[in-house]
Amino acid sequence: MAVTVVFIGKLADLAGEDERQVAAPLTWAGLGEALGADLAAAAADDRTKIAVNGKLLAEKTGLNAGDGDEVALLPPVSGG
Amino acid sequence: MVTRSRCCLRYRAADVAITVDLLDQPFNPGQFVGPFTNAHPGLGGLCSFVGEVRSDADVEALELLHYERMTRPGMEELAAQAVERFDLMGLLMVHRVGVMRPGEPIVLVSACARHRRGAIDAVDFAMDHLKSRSWFWKREKRSNGWHWIEPRQQDHSDLARWGD
């Protein structure tokens, strides 16, 4: 029973991988524990957004992902 | 009255050609703009913008990352907003991802409309939103390695012009 956590951009550099399987269900507190201190701090940064299955969370501390869900950690965008 | 305007909107949305493309290889903007122009007989104005990797001292390459399940739907939503807001006949948005060298096109936006103002403003609107609100992440390769690019204040003030 797993949730896929996807790391993007500099967060992937920090994680040392593009994604990681963690146990479901996954809450905000559980995410912090699963990520370790450095990544948890980056995830908590105001500018880091979190999406579940491609849908942005309005309030990331409300994270509640289940088996098969994909949780993406999105650093500030810099496109175009 | 409400029913009628809904009906027209639906008709128009179905009638307008929106093309959104994400490419991982170099592209020639002209090869997109030509067919796009030909596909809209009766247009009054067509405006195109091409953004390229700027030649800066010490920048060897630029890499754009995206997140497929959000980047493409986000661009499609942006395109639909531009079509609605500027009464377009068609909108074309092509964006590179992957590693690019100076001089390579990164982005192409073309809009056509019955009148020039809509086409010009739609391209400006789309570019400001692509720069600061679309799901892309950029890094540059300099002589001392790769560096992630942070969002610029200018991008946010450009976006604020549109009041949305």
Image (cartoon, coloured by chain):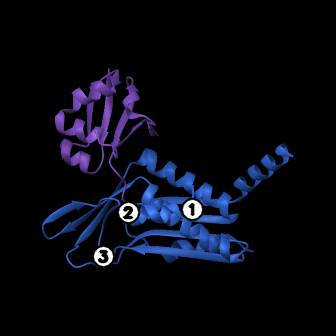
Chain colours: A purple, B blue
**Depth check, front residue: A45 or B95:** A45
Gap in Å between the C-alphas at discs 3 and 1? Answer: 30 Å
Per the image, label 2 sits on a secondary structure element best described as helix
Q: Which of marks 3 and 2 is in front?
A: 2
Q: Earlier in the sequence, mark 2 or mark 1?
A: 2
Question: Are both tags, 3 and 1, on one chain?
Answer: yes
Residue B28 seen in render? no
Mark 1 residue crowding within 10 angstroms, few (<14) / some (14–19) / many (20+)? few
Gap in Å between the C-alphas at discs 3 and 2? Answer: 23 Å
Which residue does the numbered mark 2 point to in the structure image? Answer: B153
Question: Are both tags, 3 and 2, on one chain?
Answer: yes
Per the image, label 3 sits on a secondary structure element best described as loop
Residue positioned 55% across, 55% down in the render: B78
Which residue does the numbered mark 3 point to in the structure image? Answer: B102
Which residue does the numbered mark 1 point to in the structure image? Answer: B162
Residue positioned 20% across, 41% down in the render: A15
Chain on which label 2 sits: B
Q: Residue B63 carries which label?
A: none
**Depth check, front residue: B37 or B4:** B4
- Quadrant for residue A34, please give it: top left
Classify A60 as above or below B118.
above
Chain on which label 1 sits: B
Residue B123 seen in render? yes
Amino acid carrying label 2: it is Gln
- Expressed as whole percent of the image width and height from the top left, the position of residue B69 reads 44, 44
- Expressed as whole percent of the image width and height from the top left, the position of residue B26 reads 38, 69
Locate the N terminus of chain A and report the quarter of the image it occupies.
Answer: top left
- Expressed as whole percent of the image width and height from the top left, the position of residue B158 reads 48, 66
B88 to the left or right of A56: right
Per the image, label 1 sits on a secondary structure element best described as loop
